[in-house]
Image (cartoon, rainbow, N blue to C red):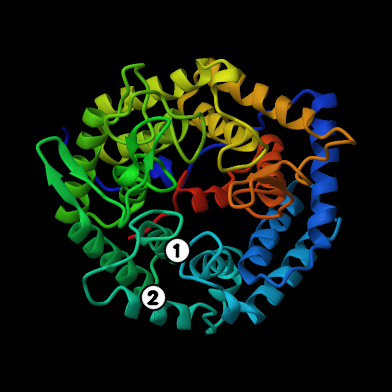
Amino acid sequence: MATAKAMAPSVASRSWQPLVTERAERDRVIAELGRLADALARVEVDDAPLRAEVALALHYAEEVLPERGYRDAAMAQLSQAIDASSTAPSLALYGGVAGLAWVVEHLTEPEASQSEEDLNEEVDAFFLQALGAPPWRGHFDLISGLCGLGVYALERGARPTGVELRRRVLERLAELAEPSADGLAFAKPHGLRRPDRDLDFRRDLGMAHGLSGVIAFLSLVGESSGTVERLLIEALRFLTTRGKSPDGGFGYAHDAHQNARVAWCYGDLGIACALWLAALRLGEPRIRDEAVAAALRAAARPYADTGIVDASLCHGTAGAAHLFNVLWQSLGARPLREAAHRSVTSLLERARPSERLGDDRTFDARTNRWEPTHSFLMGSAGIALTLTAAISERPPDWDRLLLLSGRATP
């Protein structure tokens, strides 16, 4: 494998074009986005991280639907989230302090650069303390663990505390890495065996909870060091050696018996994005070929075989739409554009009056019911952001929160 290089400029400075260009369909996207944004502007919840996710969606809605007051509504939601930040239940990137702080940095960074105030100064001190002394006893993953803190650290850019946070996240990841003859793996503190697949999920491969999230994070760290390069190359070796099922696609966990779903969180679609970022970082044609093959496999899956059951960004129609869009914009393959367009069409078809998009389309495994939610990963905020990206001429920088793109770092 080639020697690692500094982060390729195309990771941080990508081009973008609208996916939906036909007028009638674009008007339909605008109408649905406006309905979602109007509802998000009225959200009242006692959940600071959720308010921040709502603010993120409203901020980007303003870019394609200007002069509707969405930017002011975003700032109002963010202000209330900051005021209630002490109520955040965990360190997590999704639903916790790191996610709230990420949105604060993302939406206020241009203004903050013109002043001496740093709204996340205390958060940085808190995270630095949490990361300061080994061993790390929490998860390594993106949703609630080390990689999630790493995503926040990436968003802090060149700030000294951002650089130090990234260094400490890398140190803790290196300590958790488990070497094997096939490369480096990362194990969850508690394994999970799925009887239907007879899989040990302790060595998870997905973007949300597993190895692909680590690979994407390492690919976007701007600092070049022996630690970054070694971890990335060896993690890729484990993924490509032990990650595929007999069906040819990537599974949920190592040595899987069947392909995972088509989603951001698990399977070929999210893993293709991680592999593409790694190929850019390393300048490695073989990894690029793996990324293209995974993306095209996902695009070729019949809808009934995708595992999509709701409209969410995490594992639903919105996630498929946005990730296929991202991969099409990056790789240029026509089947990826067609898959992205089909997914947007399917997303809009969920917006019937009796089944309003974003209102009641997310399955909550904790309650075993379909539950309404406004969240980024599972609800209407993520759906609105997906629709925004489908008609925008500007890159969707918000998807740095999903480790689908990155900002320039030292």
Residues tagged 1 and 2 counted as in contact (Cβ below 8 A): yes
Given this view, does label 1 or label 2 mark the residue nearer the observer?
Answer: 2
102 in relation to 18, above or below: below
**Image position, residue 117 (x, y; %):** 54, 84
Q: Quadrant of residue 355?
A: top right
Please name whichever residue, 113 or 168, is drawn nearer the observer in this view of the structure.
168
Q: What residue type is labelled 2?
A: Phe
Q: What element carries label 1?
A: helix
In this figure, which residue is indicated by the disc labeled 2? 127
Q: Is residue 4 visible?
A: no
76 in relation to 62, above or below: below
265 in relation to 123, above or below: above
- Mark 1 or mark 2: whose residue is earlier in sequence: 2
| Left or right position of 340 against 68 | left
Q: Is mark 2 on a helix, strand or loop?
A: helix
Disc number for residue 152: 1
For the C terminus, the quadrant is: bottom left
Sort mark 1 into few (<14), some (14-19) or many (20+) by Cα contacts within 10 Å.
many
